[in-house]
Structure formats: structure tokens, C-alpha cells
Image: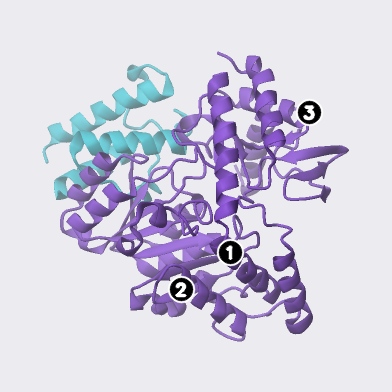
Amino acid sequence: MNLLEKLDAAAAARKSLLPDGVGAFGIPIEEVYSATEARIGDRRVLLLGTNNYLGLTFAPECIQAAHEALDKEGTGTTGSRMANGSYFGHRALEREFADFYQCSGGIVFTTGYQANLGTISGLVGPGDTVLIDGDSHASIYDGCILSGADIVRFRHNDVADMEKRLRRLGERVETTLIIAEGIYSMLGDQAPLAEIIELKNKYRCILLLDEAHSLGVLGETGQGLVEKTGLLKAVDFITGTFSKSLCSIGGFCVSNHPQLEQLRYVSHPYIFTASPSPATIASTRAALELLRKGSHLRTQLWKNCTQLYTQLKETGYQLGPDPGPVIAAILDTPQQALLMWRSLLEHNIYVNLILPPAAPEGKSLVRCSVNAAHTPEQIKYVGDTFAKLYNLVKS
Amino acid sequence: MSETDYDQIVQLLCDRLADLSKTSEESISPETNLITQLSIDSIKLLGLIMEIEDAFDISIPINALTDIQTVHELAELVHKIKSAS
């Protein structure tokens, strides 16, 4: 089989799951009306498949900041942070993230994906070990592969399994990086951070926590799981993304370890790419300010999460263990998930369809992402529609 | 590690692979290709690796699996790691 034939085989496998070419992946959104509504084809749909957790995509403060930066600094930096791409705004945002997390330093990356790629591949290399949760995001897996370190997985959120694997590493724990996530993107559950930190201290490893989905969502000021658990100081490195609660694109890493600065000189995903555009940086700075003061947004978000999680649970859907902004209905087959996804769209609700191998344990998911801008009526309509469609997937 | 240990590894792999691929254990030999003959996808393989790690109390880095195609190659990798531990 040549290279092109291999791609044909992969395309045939995809078509066998999506026989009539339904555009479940990369569906075109024609117009966006607000943080909760858009047009897909000729349908005005409710958006339940975005990561816009605080509903800030149309926040006037962010839009104005982006406009001003565009007018003053142009459309792009046209260069790497290492060369001509470090503007005042990039450095200011790094200081603001460091301040937000009470850390001595921070680095801004061009995407959240690159934040993990760049941080992980900067921290570990061949001969070192990364110990990662089995349900880790692809950016974590890819960062580990890029690093050349040995990759060992522990069973998802299973601390006893994690300790078993730490023990087996023997003296190699000295150069082991443990990686966990504040909220996992597939089922919306949270890492058992206190127990992980206990093991990290016992075995003297370094811990990186990815707060991509938990930034803005957990904790009084929205720092994430570190704030909710009161364990901020015990985590060595925190990464996150701008593309969820902060409603732009980019990523960051903060730490109290002075060695963080060295990443700027060894991390290819930081060096060999153009830096975020001035408008992106400006809107992110404005959004971070809103996020920090946004306890009212988090209150509304959690009301919405609890309302939908409770209704789906009562209907009989199998869900992840914790209520949260990521609420995934776990279905047995890709066909069930596709049918549910399509039926929801026919009822003018857009959610995410997740099929194997992206979903854990060979399951398929219909994943809702709730945000603070959803009204109780919108959430009720979604819950009622799921209830109406339950017979489609009832086993 | 003795020859018997290698045989034990192969035996365990055949047993688990038969279960995962829903095929008879007799039809699996050391030369059997995990992907083309047993349709073991990446998710199943990663699950299998965790089981082997627990069975032999070893760590198998998943990046060591890149070149593994056959039951024999996987058994040899496990054998090598177990011998070094």
C-alpha cells in the first residue's frame, strides 16, 4: 500500500462510520449570532459544543481591546518570539498570568496545543520519563513524543495505579515528569490533585498540571483546580489555553521555578512559529481581567452545568462522574452517537460528536459544553430534547 | 530470564490477544501480525500494555512500541525489559 492508498483506506474507514457523508466533523458554521447561537445551513442552532465557558466571545471590552491593537500594531507580528515577535503586549500578558497564579514567571505560546508541546519537550528529553494519565489530551501525548522521553501511562484518575508505576521506575523517578489535567476534556471529570501531589512529593518528581478546561471554571478567581483545592503552590508548572474561557487563541505556562525561562531557548514550539497577533493578545488580556473578576459568571455557569447534568442523569443517560461544563453522554456504539448527534441537530442543537479512538475505552460520546451565557430556558430545551430522544439510544 | 520466561510471555500475549481480537488462541503464533492479522488498534494495544506491565511488574514505555508488529517482537520487548529489571 503506498502513501496515498493508506489515506484512501483511512477515508474509507471514516465513510463506513458516516455513510451518507454527514458533516459531523468540521461542520460549517455560516454565521455566529452570540455566545449561544449560530446558523448552520438554514438552521438557527443553540451552541452546546463550544468551549466558550464564560460566554465572553462578544464581550465589548475584549472586542474593543482587539480593535485598538489592530489599529495601532497591525494584523500580525510576522515573527517568532525569539526574533521580532515579542511586543509589549506579549510580555505584559506573561506578567499578568504570572501575577494571576502568584508565580515568578510566565511564557505565552501561540496556541494551547503548543503550550503543552513546548513546555513538555522543553522540560524532558531522551532518557527522562513522563508519567501521564491514560486519558490525556493529544497535545500532551504529542509533547511527550516530541520530547523523546519514555512515556508511561497510568489508568485514568487511578492514584493507586499511578503509584505502582512510580515505584516500578526505581531511580528513574528523579527525572520523571508527572502530567495531569484540571478537567479532562472527554468526560469532564477532575484530577485527584491532592493525592497526585502526595505521590509527587513522596517520589520527588516534578508535576505539570494542564488547566485548559478548568481555567475560568474552578476556584473563586478562576485559576482552576489549583485554586479549588488550595494546592497552587504544590504544582511545579501550570499550562493552559486562551481558546476556551478566554475566547481567543494561544496558550501559557507559569511556574515558580526560575528554569522556566530556559524554555524560551530550547522549546521549538515556542521558537519556530510566529507569535500571537497583537489583537489576540489584547483581547486575551481584557478577557483575563474579566475572568479574574467573573465570579458571577462562574456562579451562572455552575447553575447551568448542574441543571443540565441533573436532567440528563435523571433521564437515564450514562455521564462522566462529575457535573461540570463538559457533560458527555456515553454511548455504546458510533452509530448510536451519530444518530443522537444528527437528531439533536434536527432539533437545532449543536453538540460535539466524539468517536473512537478519540473517546476513552472505545466508547462514543455526544458531548455538551455548557456556558455562562446560556439561559435556563435554553438549558431546559436541551435537557428536554435529550429526554425526548432517549429512546434512540436506550439499551 | 530463561527460555521458559519467554514462553510464558508468549503464552500470556496469545491468551490476551485472542480475547481482544475475538479469535481462537490456536490461530495466534509468534509470527502473527498484531495490526494486519488481529486488527489490534492503538487503544487496544495500550490497554494490553498496561495489563502486561501489571502481570510482570515492569514499565513499558509506549514509545518503545513504535516498531512492534508481531507477537514475537512484543514478547521480545517484554522479555528484554523484564530481564533488565
Figure quadrant of residue B57: top left
Figure quadrant of residue A7: top right
Residue pointed to by mark 1 = A111
Report x, y in % for residue A146: 44, 62
Q: Nearer the viewer, residue A324 or A27?
A: A324
Rendered shade, chain B: cyan
Give yes or no for contact between labels 1 and 2 (Cβ–Cβ under 8 Å).
no
The quadrant of the rendering that contains the N terminus of chain A is top right
| Amino acid type at image mark 2 | Asp
Report x, y in % for residue A219: 45, 54
In the picture, the disc for residue A99 is 2
Q: Nearer the viewer, residue A346 or B16?
A: A346
Parent chain of label 2? A
Residue A18 visible in the shown view: no
Alpha carbons under labels 2 and 3: distance apart: 46 Å
Rendered shade, chain A: purple
Report x, y in % for residue A325: 56, 43
Residue pointed to by mark 3 = A346
Q: Earlier in the sequence, mark 2 or mark 3?
A: 2
Parent chain of label 3? A
Note whether A203 is above or below A106 in the view shown. above
- Identify which residue is drawn at 50% across, 60% down: A240
Residue B41 visible in the shown view: yes
The local secondary structure at tag 1 comes to loop
Give yes or no for contact between labels 3 and 1 (Cβ–Cβ under 8 Å).
no
- Identify which residue is drawn at 60% across, 52% down: A297
